[in-house]
Image (cartoon, helix red, strand yellow):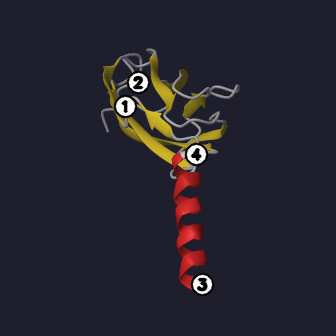
Amino acid sequence: MKKLILTGAFLLGGIALMSAQEIEISESNVDLGTIEYGGKAVTTVQIKNTGDKPLIISDAKASCGCTVPTWPKDPIAPGKTAPMTVQYTTTTRPGAFNKTVTINSNAVTEARKIFRIKGVVKENPNAAVSNQ
């Protein structure tokens, strides 16, 4: 009897996972290449709901304040996609950058999904040159 109950619970749990909301990102590593100092460093990734229940993005956080994600506030219907835009500030940190964005959602298997943006910001052409 115990085996029957355990088997039933296991099967129901598996069915619950199969009929849930899931998340997929169009690109997990975005290379913005070389960007002019003060230039626009923006990318858009597509968030797809591969499940059969509405996907809700509750939050998206970047690894620092120089990177700002803008995520869809409305639920993403099953099988549909929605854009997420990420902007990197190029006027404060010339040189290479590699930042992460963490997406928090109601997805069952990956409630936290991480992707990266990277690139190189050229030096400020108007910066004072020191001869010291």
- Indicate the amino acid at tag 3: Met
Tell me the amino acid under the disc marked 1.
Glu
Comes first in the chain, label 4 or label 1: 1
Q: Which residue is denoted by mark 2 in the rendering?
A: 128
**How far across and how far down the image is residue 96, in percent?**
33, 36
Judge the density around disc 1: few (<14), some (14-19), many (≥20) Cα neighbours within 10 Å: some
**CA–CA distance in space, label 3 to label 1:** 48 Å
Q: Which of the 4 quarters of the picture holds residue 125?
A: top left
Q: Secondary structure at mark 3?
A: loop
Q: Nearer the viewer, mark 1 or mark 2?
A: 1
Q: Which residue is mark 4?
A: 107
Disc 4 vs disc 3: which is toward the camera?
Answer: 3
Number of numbered discs visible in the structure rendering: 4
Q: x%, y% of residue 29?
A: 34, 36
Query: Which residue of the protein is positioned furthest toward the bottom in this rendering?
Result: 2
Residue drawn at (50%, 29%), measured in percent from left and top? 47
- Please determine whether, in this image, residue 116 is positioned above or below residue 48: below
Distance, label 1 to label 2, CA atoms, is 38 Å
* Circle 1 SS class: loop
Mark 3, residue position: 1
Instruction: Determine the residue positioned at 40% across, 29% down.
Output: 26
Q: CA distance from mark 4 to mark 3?
A: 34 Å
Q: Which residue bears the numbered disc 1?
A: 27
How crowded pointer 2 is (Cα within 10 Å; few <14, some 14-19, many 20+) is rated as: few
